[in-house]
Amino acid sequence: MNTAVHKQRHGFTLLELLIVISIISALMGILLPSMHRARLQARDTLCMTQLRALHLSLSVYLHDNERFPPLNNEPDDGAWQYNYLIYDGRDMHSNFGAILGDGVSLDTIAPLYCPRQTDPYHSLSTPENPWPAVPLLDTRAAYARRYHLTGKKLSQLTRNPAILSDIFHIPKVVKSGHKKGVNVAYLDGHVQYVKDRGYLLDNELTHPFKPEDNDLIEDIWDEFNRAGR
Protein backbone atom coordinates (compact mmCIF):
# COMPACT_ATOMS: atom_id res chain seq x y z
CA MET A 1 0.00 0.00 0.00
CA ASN A 2 1.40 3.40 -1.00
CA THR A 3 1.58 5.87 1.79
CA ALA A 4 1.42 9.49 0.74
CA VAL A 5 3.83 11.68 2.59
CA HIS A 6 2.54 15.17 2.98
CA LYS A 7 5.12 17.86 3.73
CA GLN A 8 3.78 20.74 5.67
CA ARG A 9 5.05 24.18 4.65
CA HIS A 10 5.81 26.62 7.38
CA GLY A 11 5.62 30.40 6.78
CA PHE A 12 6.54 33.18 9.16
CA THR A 13 4.29 33.46 12.11
CA LEU A 14 3.11 36.90 13.08
CA LEU A 15 5.43 36.86 16.07
CA GLU A 16 8.45 35.95 13.94
CA LEU A 17 7.60 38.69 11.46
CA LEU A 18 7.34 41.26 14.22
CA ILE A 19 10.71 40.18 15.59
CA VAL A 20 12.36 40.56 12.16
CA ILE A 21 10.80 43.99 11.70
CA SER A 22 11.98 45.11 15.13
CA ILE A 23 15.53 43.92 14.41
CA ILE A 24 15.60 45.76 11.07
CA SER A 25 14.23 48.91 12.72
CA ALA A 26 16.88 48.73 15.44
CA LEU A 27 19.65 48.33 12.86
CA MET A 28 18.34 51.28 10.86
CA GLY A 29 18.24 53.36 14.03
CA ILE A 30 21.91 52.55 14.59
CA LEU A 31 23.15 52.84 11.02
CA LEU A 32 21.27 55.86 9.66
CA PRO A 33 22.74 58.43 12.10
CA SER A 34 26.19 56.97 11.44
CA MET A 35 25.66 57.26 7.70
CA HIS A 36 24.45 60.84 8.11
CA ARG A 37 27.52 61.75 10.17
CA ALA A 38 29.76 60.08 7.59
CA ARG A 39 28.17 62.11 4.79
CA LEU A 40 28.66 65.35 6.73
CA GLN A 41 32.28 64.46 7.49
CA ALA A 42 32.87 63.73 3.81
CA ARG A 43 31.43 67.15 2.91
CA ASP A 44 33.60 68.80 5.56
CA THR A 45 36.66 67.18 4.01
CA LEU A 46 35.58 68.19 0.51
CA CYS A 47 35.11 71.78 1.69
CA MET A 48 38.68 71.87 3.00
CA THR A 49 39.92 70.36 -0.26
CA GLN A 50 38.10 73.01 -2.25
CA LEU A 51 39.46 75.82 -0.11
CA ARG A 52 42.98 74.48 -0.72
CA ALA A 53 42.22 74.37 -4.45
CA LEU A 54 40.93 77.95 -4.30
CA HIS A 55 44.05 79.03 -2.43
CA LEU A 56 46.19 77.36 -5.11
CA SER A 57 44.20 79.08 -7.87
CA LEU A 58 44.68 82.43 -6.14
CA SER A 59 48.42 81.70 -5.90
CA VAL A 60 48.55 80.99 -9.65
CA TYR A 61 46.74 84.26 -10.31
CA LEU A 62 49.17 86.18 -8.09
CA HIS A 63 52.15 84.54 -9.78
CA ASP A 64 50.91 85.85 -13.14
CA ASN A 65 49.48 89.18 -12.02
CA GLU A 66 51.56 89.95 -8.89
CA ARG A 67 48.77 91.70 -6.99
CA PHE A 68 45.41 90.70 -5.52
CA PRO A 69 42.50 91.59 -7.81
CA PRO A 70 39.96 94.21 -6.72
CA LEU A 71 37.41 92.94 -4.23
CA ASN A 72 34.64 94.83 -6.04
CA ASN A 73 34.11 97.90 -8.17
CA GLU A 74 33.97 100.28 -5.22
CA PRO A 75 36.85 102.51 -4.02
CA ASP A 76 38.91 101.10 -1.15
CA ASP A 77 37.03 97.77 -1.48
CA GLY A 78 33.74 99.47 -0.61
CA ALA A 79 31.40 97.52 1.59
CA TRP A 80 32.88 94.28 2.90
CA GLN A 81 29.92 92.06 1.96
CA TYR A 82 31.06 91.96 -1.66
CA ASN A 83 33.97 89.72 -0.67
CA TYR A 84 32.05 86.72 -2.02
CA LEU A 85 31.25 88.06 -5.50
CA ILE A 86 31.98 86.18 -8.71
CA TYR A 87 29.95 88.35 -11.07
CA ASP A 88 28.65 91.76 -10.03
CA GLY A 89 25.99 92.15 -12.71
CA ARG A 90 28.44 93.90 -15.02
CA ASP A 91 31.71 92.00 -15.35
CA MET A 92 34.01 89.37 -13.83
CA HIS A 93 36.95 91.67 -13.17
CA SER A 94 36.78 91.53 -9.39
CA ASN A 95 37.40 89.04 -6.59
CA PHE A 96 36.71 85.41 -7.59
CA GLY A 97 35.50 86.51 -11.02
CA ALA A 98 39.01 87.65 -11.91
CA ILE A 99 40.44 84.26 -10.96
CA LEU A 100 37.73 82.34 -12.79
CA GLY A 101 37.64 84.64 -15.78
CA ASP A 102 41.34 84.60 -16.72
CA GLY A 103 41.01 81.06 -18.09
CA VAL A 104 44.18 79.92 -16.31
CA SER A 105 43.96 80.16 -12.53
CA LEU A 106 40.60 78.40 -12.08
CA ASP A 107 38.95 76.43 -14.87
CA THR A 108 35.64 75.57 -13.21
CA ILE A 109 33.26 77.33 -10.85
CA ALA A 110 32.63 74.26 -8.64
CA PRO A 111 35.45 74.91 -6.10
CA LEU A 112 33.75 78.20 -5.19
CA TYR A 113 30.87 76.38 -3.49
CA CYS A 114 31.03 74.68 -0.12
CA PRO A 115 29.23 71.30 -0.20
CA ARG A 116 27.77 72.00 3.25
CA GLN A 117 26.29 75.39 2.34
CA THR A 118 22.53 75.31 1.65
CA ASP A 119 21.71 79.03 1.56
CA PRO A 120 20.21 79.65 -1.91
CA TYR A 121 22.10 82.93 -2.28
CA HIS A 122 25.38 81.05 -1.94
CA SER A 123 24.56 77.80 -3.74
CA LEU A 124 25.38 77.09 -7.37
CA SER A 125 22.77 77.80 -10.06
CA THR A 126 19.74 78.75 -8.01
CA PRO A 127 17.12 81.38 -8.91
CA GLU A 128 18.67 83.62 -6.24
CA ASN A 129 22.23 82.96 -7.45
CA PRO A 130 22.24 82.37 -11.21
CA TRP A 131 24.98 80.66 -13.19
CA PRO A 132 25.76 81.15 -16.04
CA ALA A 133 25.85 84.82 -15.16
CA VAL A 134 22.85 87.01 -15.87
CA PRO A 135 23.38 90.74 -16.57
CA LEU A 136 22.41 93.02 -13.67
CA LEU A 137 22.22 90.08 -11.22
CA ASP A 138 24.97 89.10 -8.78
CA THR A 139 26.52 85.64 -8.75
CA ARG A 140 27.98 84.85 -5.34
CA ALA A 141 30.42 82.23 -4.08
CA ALA A 142 30.09 80.26 -0.85
CA TYR A 143 33.57 81.40 0.16
CA ALA A 144 34.86 84.83 1.15
CA ARG A 145 38.12 86.68 0.61
CA ARG A 146 39.69 88.86 3.21
CA TYR A 147 38.84 92.54 3.04
CA HIS A 148 41.57 95.09 2.11
CA LEU A 149 43.93 92.83 0.16
CA THR A 150 43.24 94.63 -3.13
CA GLY A 151 46.42 95.69 -4.94
CA LYS A 152 48.76 94.03 -2.45
CA LYS A 153 51.54 91.57 -3.21
CA LEU A 154 52.03 88.36 -1.26
CA SER A 155 55.34 89.72 -0.02
CA GLN A 156 53.48 92.51 1.78
CA LEU A 157 51.57 90.05 3.98
CA THR A 158 53.15 88.99 7.26
CA ARG A 159 52.49 86.52 10.07
CA ASN A 160 50.51 84.07 7.92
CA PRO A 161 47.09 85.77 7.93
CA ALA A 162 43.76 84.14 7.11
CA ILE A 163 42.87 85.09 3.53
CA LEU A 164 39.93 82.83 2.56
CA SER A 165 37.07 81.24 4.46
CA ASP A 166 33.53 79.97 4.32
CA ILE A 167 31.09 82.85 4.15
CA PHE A 168 30.17 84.22 7.57
CA HIS A 169 28.70 87.69 6.96
CA ILE A 170 25.49 86.97 8.89
CA PRO A 171 24.82 84.20 11.42
CA LYS A 172 22.28 82.38 9.26
CA VAL A 173 24.86 81.53 6.56
CA VAL A 174 27.12 80.00 9.20
CA LYS A 175 24.19 77.91 10.45
CA SER A 176 23.30 76.84 6.89
CA GLY A 177 26.89 75.73 6.35
CA HIS A 178 29.05 74.09 9.02
CA LYS A 179 26.60 75.10 11.78
CA LYS A 180 29.03 76.16 14.51
CA GLY A 181 32.11 77.41 12.70
CA VAL A 182 33.86 77.86 9.37
CA ASN A 183 36.81 76.48 7.44
CA VAL A 184 39.60 79.01 6.97
CA ALA A 185 42.55 79.04 4.52
CA TYR A 186 45.77 80.79 5.52
CA LEU A 187 48.54 82.40 3.52
CA ASP A 188 50.79 79.33 3.84
CA GLY A 189 48.06 77.15 2.27
CA HIS A 190 46.91 75.23 5.30
CA VAL A 191 43.18 75.00 6.00
CA GLN A 192 41.59 74.46 9.40
CA TYR A 193 38.18 74.48 11.01
CA VAL A 194 37.63 77.45 13.31
CA LYS A 195 34.86 76.94 15.82
CA ASP A 196 32.71 79.91 16.76
CA ARG A 197 33.57 81.55 20.07
CA GLY A 198 30.72 84.01 20.02
CA TYR A 199 31.70 86.24 17.11
CA LEU A 200 30.09 84.27 14.24
CA LEU A 201 26.69 83.30 15.59
CA ASP A 202 26.16 86.20 17.98
CA ASN A 203 27.36 89.49 16.53
CA GLU A 204 26.06 92.94 15.64
CA LEU A 205 26.35 92.69 11.86
CA THR A 206 23.38 94.34 10.21
CA HIS A 207 21.22 93.44 7.27
CA PRO A 208 21.07 95.42 5.07
CA PHE A 209 24.72 96.13 5.60
CA LYS A 210 26.21 99.39 6.81
CA PRO A 211 29.73 100.84 6.44
CA GLU A 212 30.35 100.48 10.16
CA ASP A 213 30.09 96.70 9.72
CA ASN A 214 33.54 96.78 8.08
CA ASP A 215 35.34 97.13 11.43
CA LEU A 216 33.50 94.15 12.88
CA ILE A 217 34.37 92.04 9.85
CA GLU A 218 38.03 92.98 10.29
CA ASP A 219 37.80 91.88 13.93
CA ILE A 220 36.46 88.49 12.83
CA TRP A 221 39.32 88.02 10.34
CA ASP A 222 41.72 88.89 13.15
CA GLU A 223 40.10 86.17 15.28
CA PHE A 224 40.77 83.76 12.42
CA ASN A 225 44.41 84.91 12.43
CA ARG A 226 44.75 84.10 16.12
CA ALA A 227 43.11 80.70 15.65
CA GLY A 228 45.68 79.79 13.00
CA ARG A 229 48.75 80.53 15.11
Image: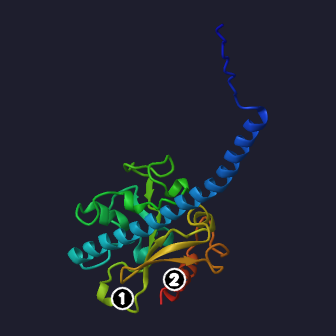
Q: Nearer the viewer, residue 139 or 119?
A: 119
User: Dot 1, crowdedness within 10 Å: few (<14), some or many (≥20)?
Assistant: few
Which residue is at the far bottom?
A: 159
Snapshot quadrant of residue 177? bottom right
Q: Position of residue 216 (x, y in %)?
A: 58, 80
Q: Earlier in the sequence, mark 2 or mark 1?
A: 1
Mark 2: amino acid:
Phe
Pick whichever, 48 or 136, lies toward us. Answer: 48
Q: Secondary structure at mark 2?
A: helix
**In the rendered image of this protein, does residue 115 appear above or below residue 144?**
above
Q: Residue 157 has which mark?
A: 1
Cα–Cα gap, marks 2 and 1: 15 Å
Q: Nearer the viewer, residue 4 or 44?
A: 4
Q: Is residue 194 left or right of residue 105?
A: right
For residue 61, side relative to residue 144 (left or right):
left
Q: Tell me whether circle 2 and circle 1 mark residues in contact (CB < 8 Å).
A: no
Amino acid on which the number 1 mark rests in the picture: Leu
Above or below, comparing residue 211 to residue 33 in the picture: below
Q: Residue at the location (53% across, 58% down)?
A: 39
Q: Residue at x 37, y 68 (%)?
A: 95
Q: Which mark is residue 224?
A: 2
In the image, residue 109 lies at what x, y percent? 35, 57
Q: Secondary structure at mark 1?
A: loop
Residue 52 image offset from top left, x and y in percent: 37, 72
Q: Residue furthest top?
A: 1
Q: Classify residue 63 as left or right of residue 164.
A: left
Question: Which mark's residue is nearer the viewer, 2 or 1?
Answer: 2
